Image (tube, coloured by chain):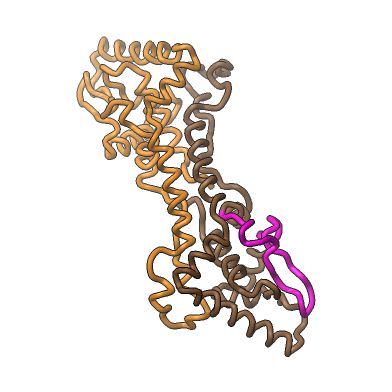
Chain colours: A orange, B brown
Amino acid sequence: MALYGAPVEYALHTLLNLCLAPADIPHSAKDLAEFQQLPVPFMRKLLTQLQRADLVRAGKGVRGGWMLARAPEDISVLAVADAAQGGRHRVFECKNVRARCVLWGDGTPPPSAVSGTCEIHAVMLKAEKELRKSLAAQSLADIAARVNSKTGGASSVVIKGWFNDRFATRRDHKQGAIDE
Amino acid sequence: MALYGAPVEYALHTLLNLCLAPADIPHSAKDLAEFQQLPVPFMRKLLTQLQRADLVRAGKGVRGGWMLARAPEDISVLAVADAAQGGRHRVFECKNVRARCVLWGDGTPPPSAVSGTCEIHAVMLKAEKELRKSLAAQSLADIAARVNSKTGGASSVVIKGWFNDRFATRRDHKQGAIDE
């Protein structure tokens, strides 16, 4: 099983869409769900989780909806992954196996055998640090720039157009809460 | 859920025990299981997986049993983790979400939109590479040296003594297959 599952992938694509969509107007959960062909309740749950991590913010009413809560440069892939998984997932969960050894019998292991961090756990913690450092060094803005570079800027133009159209339709129809 | 589960932790401790135990005599699955207070069938399964990855080797008969298949310097934590999990576990499993977008309707996305590696996946692959590089740089010998250094060499002495006693008992009783 992978460390980061589907919620992380959807969260990153959704935030990337918000990053490429017009930044000065809010976007409804319905539009964001439709754009990525996801069920609206799933998108709402995802946005709520991202909101708790201060990655998106929501406004209410006709002019309401979802926007990035920070500049894309200040949203790291690591922050999105942690938020989408509802907390930090570990590379390795130490069960302190060193405390279960025939040498200690059924009793308590001597403090010298279980003090400090287990050397195996320490190796895993170091590797996890490298993984997180790499994810922390990449922002939404970095990814958006590469996507735009790959498509000669077409991605941004097309995505901006789609979300602008949606926003105009919603405004014209004077619907209720934009995030419905 | 963590990327590396209990089998990885048990595999690393078992190989570390083999590394600290006398290297010139074989050790039974029963002894290795008892030492770490694990069920024998679990230990047999673990050793078979480690054998498939060429990390341990087995001999048969009274002088048979399990030994490291390579020098501890040549067994990386990464190799043990992959072997114990029955293959490489990924940091991120890309579901190619970029292919599911309202812009492509129900049809096939244009090749330009799905060619090459997705930029989100690329970030994850880079982070996974850092994680694996860190784990590949650490060997059983490195961990054993740190454990010995922490205990002033006592770990090695005590573990060697326990496994030597077991081997002597088995030899004296002329039991059948040593790995029973």
The total of numbered circles placed on residues is: 0
Quadrant housing the C terminus of chain B: bottom right
* Residue B120, image x, y percentages: 47, 30
- Vertical side of A153 occupied by B165: above or below: below
Q: Residue at x 20, y 26 (%)?
A: A60
- To which quarter of the image does residue B141 belong? bottom right
Percent x, y for residue B34? Answer: 58, 77
Residue at (43, 25) in percent of width and height: A143
Is residue A38 part of the magenta span, yes or no?
no
Front-lying residue, A6 or B106: A6
Return the x and y of residue A16 as percentages of the image width and height: 39, 25
Q: Is residue B129 above or below residue A16?
A: below
In the figure, residue A75 lies in which quadrant?
A: top left
Q: For this view, does A26 lie left or right of residue A16?
A: left
Asked if residue A93 is positioned above or below residue B21 in the image, the reply reads above
- Residue at figure coordinates x 35%, y 11% from the top left: A165
User: Where does the magenta region start and end?
Assistant: B48-77
As rendered, which of A72 and A177 lies closer to the eye?
A: A72
**Foreground pick, A147 / B126:** B126
Q: Residue furthest bottom?
A: B172
The image shows residue A55 at horizontal and vertical percentages of: 29, 33
Residue under the point 47% across and 38% down: A6
- In the displayed structure, A108 sits above or below B13; it is below
Q: Nearer the viewer, residue B5 or A51?
A: B5
Q: Is residue A1 left or right of residue A130?
A: right
Is B70 colored magenta in this rendering?
A: yes
